[in-house]
């Protein structure tokens, strides 16, 4: 049983970009102060830090919208290094923080902008717009011909993301792309993001204020403060060993729980289950055992959990979807299900809701201490 | 609980409506009172003037001296307004306003057509008549009536068309033959249309020059901080020079220029005439054009431009795809202001030997012919209003669909 993180280690990934000792000044303000950072290729790098710490400025350095006052930026790929600024930007989708949709263009025309700049064929483009809008959970039929002033903040933001993805660029710079979206849609968009990223493996630099979002999406996490980098590492490492008190406070008092969100149920802790269609027999659930027995219905869906607590068998009916988890649920969700059901373990079900395994509290404990 | 909510839902909006209704009623009563006052004053001022010839002294004619029938006709519109003010429901009695408006335009002209020729016939062959201050005030009152209306409806247009048709019919009969302004216009003959065209041409060329220079200059000024420090103070100074002074200032250098290069004289460039007028007018018109264009460009949301640059548009593309379309309405507003201003200012061209409607105004002043000045003025006003209307339509057409909002 492996208990380590499932993410690739960063040592062997080449750098997409190396910024050495860069500083950026806006008049009197020093926005970036002697920053050195590497962005790994084909990975998600998340920038996080308090307001005004220079996250957006860092993104703008990457696509040359801001001139550095000292230091230099090397792109790993010689062909990128040789590009003009406009070509460079056309290869990087950029979703800016304030969205900035063209007010005189429809949603479709906005999303279509970069493909049009690149001279794609018309038929190809129309189809692509629909795909992108669906991707950000907007119905193309409804939204295609709307103007930006007819959109809500969250809708406009999603159109902005679709626009950044427009020409399928190998590099994505996303400045708080889901900031104005409701938690439910945001989670769906994150899921979608993870799913796509697993397939396409783009180089992504993602800015967020939401530490949960950061931990969830990041392969590489950069914590910034006052124009400097405080700590840059994998989320696991940062959660396990915060560099200083600032990082620790930034991660919040529940960082052990947050760390659990890095592990999924299937990868490390699925265990053999004891189950049946009837009540548990003596052999299935021996007296005083700390194991669980799951009663399933005719379809194999768990309906009741049994365990020994304080010398007597207790029964817990499984009535809600929050009482069970799925193989790709995070350990944090497992923990929540365990607490919600009041059992020492939670049942893992497959996509059809059939019993598949269980995750035990003890296992989680071992992982969080590893 | 249920009943409580229903009662509230029923009562509250009704209360609000009643309040709104009351205040609307009061507002309209006040306006009606003002209109009636203006009507009343107009009855005590000279309604028209008669003259033995174009420059002899005015003989005023008052309403009180009119026969019963014309007086009654003139009294009809104010009576309707009074009725309207006494009605409780201002919305339902709106038709009274429409009627009063159309009749209010028709009545004074009909009365003029009726009494004018009568009075003039006693004064000899060169006699003429013109509307007096009482009639102007009367028409002003009618204009306020139209402003009182919530909306100009199809009925109003029909009313106006009927009034216009009657007036044209009266004119065709010859009732206005001795009207001062028309006499002057007839005296001018083909020269009149020549001056109108000249006025339009001078204005058009000046606006053309200031657009061609002003808009690019605004773009450059926007791009370069140094240009901004140079251009705006210069424009401000230019704007403070009085019109006539600027016209005068140009005479000497242009005269010298045409002296030095006689070739220029053949192209019409000399110290006096239309050239200095056009130069001065363009210099004036350039101010609103640069101001409005600059404001329009710099008020574009910075994040829109940032997004455009961020997606890899070249600076030319940012201008073409983003800035110019978004700034177009603002730029056109600047041109419209410049145009209206230039049509007025072009009157001054006559002062340095230029053409245009200024010829009528200043020659009229010189000959002490009020009617001639009036003819010039009316034509300038008509040109201004027409140009303004046409430009408004143009602006609406050229504004991107999503930026067309009502009331902006
Ligand atoms: N165009 C600008 N002109 C002047 N100062 C700027 C400009 N843009 C950013 N700054 C300043 O630079 C600093 C860093 O700004 P930046 O936008 O990078 O912050 P951020 O980390 O993205 O903050 P937030 O989380 O609020 O978006 C801030 O102090 C800000 O005031
Ligand atoms: Mg920011």
Image (cartoon, coloured by chain):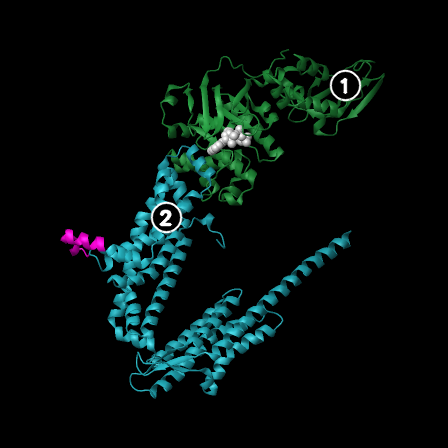
Q: Indicate whether residue B97 is drawn in magenta.
A: no
Relative image position of residue A56 (x, y in whole percent): 50, 29
- The local secondary structure at tag 1 comes to strand
CA–CA distance in space, label 2 to label 1: 82 Å
Residue wearing tag 1: A293
Relative image position of residue B21 (x, y in whole percent): 63, 64
Is residue B245 found left or right of A266 in the rendered image?
A: left
- The local secondary structure at tag 2 comes to helix
Q: Is residue A149 among what the camera can see?
A: yes
Relative image position of residue A234 (x, y in whole percent): 56, 17
Tag 2, which chain? B
Looking at this view, is B221 or A256 the one in front? Answer: B221
Q: Are marks 2 and 1 on the same chain?
A: no
Residue wearing tag 2: B290
For the stretch drawn in magenta, what is the main secondary structure? helix
Outermost residue on the right side: it is: A311
**Mark 1 surroundings within 10 Å by alpha-carbon count, few (fewer than 14), some (14 through 19), many (20 or more):** many
Outermost residue on the bottom side: it is: B122
Q: Where residue A264 is drawn, which disc sits there?
A: none
- Rendering colour (chain A): green
Tag 1, which chain? A
Relative image position of residue B118 (x, y in whole percent): 37, 86
Against B85, residue B281 (above or below) is above
Range of magenta residues: B252-268
Q: Indicate whether residue B255 is drawn in magenta.
A: yes
Is residue B105 found left or right of B180 in the rendered image?
A: right
Query: What residue lies at 48% left-to-right and 44% top-to-bottom?
Result: A145
Q: Is residue A219 among what the camera can see?
A: no
Quadrant (top left, top right, bottom left, bottom right) of the C terminus of chain A: top right
Tell me the cyan chain: B
Looking at this view, is A356 or B83 the one in front? Answer: B83
């Amino acid at each position: 049983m492996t208990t380590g993180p499932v993410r690739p280690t960063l040592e062997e990934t080449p750098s997409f970009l190396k910024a050495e000792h860069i500083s950026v000044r806006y008049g009197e303000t020093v926005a970036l102060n002697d920053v050195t950072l590497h962005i790994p290729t084909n990975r998600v790098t998340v920038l996080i830090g308090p307001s005004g710490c220079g996250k957006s400025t860092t993104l703008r350095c990457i696509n040359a919208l801001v001139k550095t006052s000292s230091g230099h930026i090397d792109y790993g790929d010689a062909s990128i290094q040789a590009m003009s600024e406009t070509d460079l930007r056309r290869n990087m989708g950029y979703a800016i923080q304030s969205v900035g949709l063209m007010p005189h263009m429809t949603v479709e025309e906005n999303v279509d902008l970069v493909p049009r700049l690149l001279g794609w064929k018309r038929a190809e483009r129309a189809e692509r717009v629909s795909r992108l809008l669906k991707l950000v959970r907007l119905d193309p039929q409804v939204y295609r011909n709307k103007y930006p002033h007819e959109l809500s903040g969250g809708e406009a933001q999603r159109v902005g993301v679709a626009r950044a993805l427009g020409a399928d660029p190998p590099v994505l710079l996303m400045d708080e792309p889901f900031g104005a979206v409701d938690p439910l849609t945001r989670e769906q968009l994150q899921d979608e993001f993870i799913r796509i990223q697993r397939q396409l493996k783009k180089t992504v630099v993602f800015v967020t204020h939401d530490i949960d979002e950061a931990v969830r999406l990041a392969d590489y996490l950069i914590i910034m403060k006052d124009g400097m980098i405080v700590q840059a590492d994998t989320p696991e490492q940062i959660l396990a060993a915060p560099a200083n008190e600032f990082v620790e406070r930034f991660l919040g008092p529940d960082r052990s729980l947050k760390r659990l969100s890095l592990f999924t149920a299937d990868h490390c802790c699925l265990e053999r289950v004891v189950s049946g269609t009837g009540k548990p027999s003596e052999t299935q659930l021996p007296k005083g055992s700390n194991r669980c027995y799951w009663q399933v219905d005719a379809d194999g869906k768990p309906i009741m959990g049994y365990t020994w607590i304080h010398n007597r068998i207790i029964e817990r009916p499984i009535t809600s979807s929050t009482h069970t988890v799925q193989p790709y649920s995070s350990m944090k969700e497992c923990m929540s299900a365990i607490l919600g059901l009041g059992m020492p373990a939670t049942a893992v079900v497959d996509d059809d809701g059939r019993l598949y395994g269980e995750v035990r509290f003890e296992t989680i404990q071992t992982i969080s201490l590893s | 609980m249920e009943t409580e909510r229903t009662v509230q839902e029923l009562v509250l909006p009704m209360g609000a409506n009643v309040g709104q209704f009351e205040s609307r009623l009061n507002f309209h009563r006040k306006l009606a009172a003002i209109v009636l006052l203006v009507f009343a004053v107009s009855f005590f001022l000279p309604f028209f003037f008669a003259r033995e010839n174009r420059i002899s002294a005015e003989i005023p004619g008052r309403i009180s001296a009119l026969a019963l029938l014309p007086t009654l006709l003139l009294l009809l519109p104010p009576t309707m307004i009074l009725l309207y003010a006494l009605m409780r429901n201002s919305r339902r009695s709106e038709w009274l306003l429409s009627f009063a408006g159309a009749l209010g335009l028709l009545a004074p002209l009909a009365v003029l057509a009726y009494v004018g020729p009568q009075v003039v016939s006693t004064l000899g062959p060169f006699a003429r008549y013109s509307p007096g201050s009482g009639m102007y005030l009367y028409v002003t009152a009618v204009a306020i009536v139209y402003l009182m209306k919530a909306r100009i409806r199809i009925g109003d247009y029909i009313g106006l068309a009927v009034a216009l048709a009657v007036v044209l019919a009266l004119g065709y009969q010859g009732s206005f033959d001795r009207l001062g302004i028309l006499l002057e216009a007839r005296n001018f003959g083909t020269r009149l249309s020549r001056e109108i065209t000249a006025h339009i041409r001078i204005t058009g060329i000046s606006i053309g020059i200031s657009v061609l220079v002003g808009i690019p200059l605004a773009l450059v000024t926007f791009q370069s901080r140094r240009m901004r420090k140079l251009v705006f103070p210069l424009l401000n100074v230019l704007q403070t020079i009085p019109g006539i002074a600027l016209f005068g200032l140009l005479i000497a250098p242009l005269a010298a220029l045409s002296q030095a290069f006689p070739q220029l004289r053949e192209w019409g460039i000399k110290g006096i005439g239309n050239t200095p007028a056009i130069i001065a007018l363009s210099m004036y018109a350039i101010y609103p054009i640069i101001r409005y264009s600059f404001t329009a460009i710099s008020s574009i949301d910075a994040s829109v431009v940032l997004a455009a640059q961020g997606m890899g548009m070249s600076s030319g593309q940012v201008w073409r795809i983003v800035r110019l379309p978004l700034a177009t309405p603002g730029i056109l507003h600047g041109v419209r202001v410049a145009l209206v201003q230039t049509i007025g200012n072009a009157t001054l061209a006559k002062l340095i030997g230029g053409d245009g409607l200024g010829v009528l105004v200043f020659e009229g002043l010189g000959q002490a012919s009020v009617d001639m000045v009036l003819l010039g003025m009316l034509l300038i006003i008509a040109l201004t209003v027409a140009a303004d209307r046409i430009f408004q339509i143009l602006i609406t057409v050229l504004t991107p669909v999503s930026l067309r909002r009502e009331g902006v």
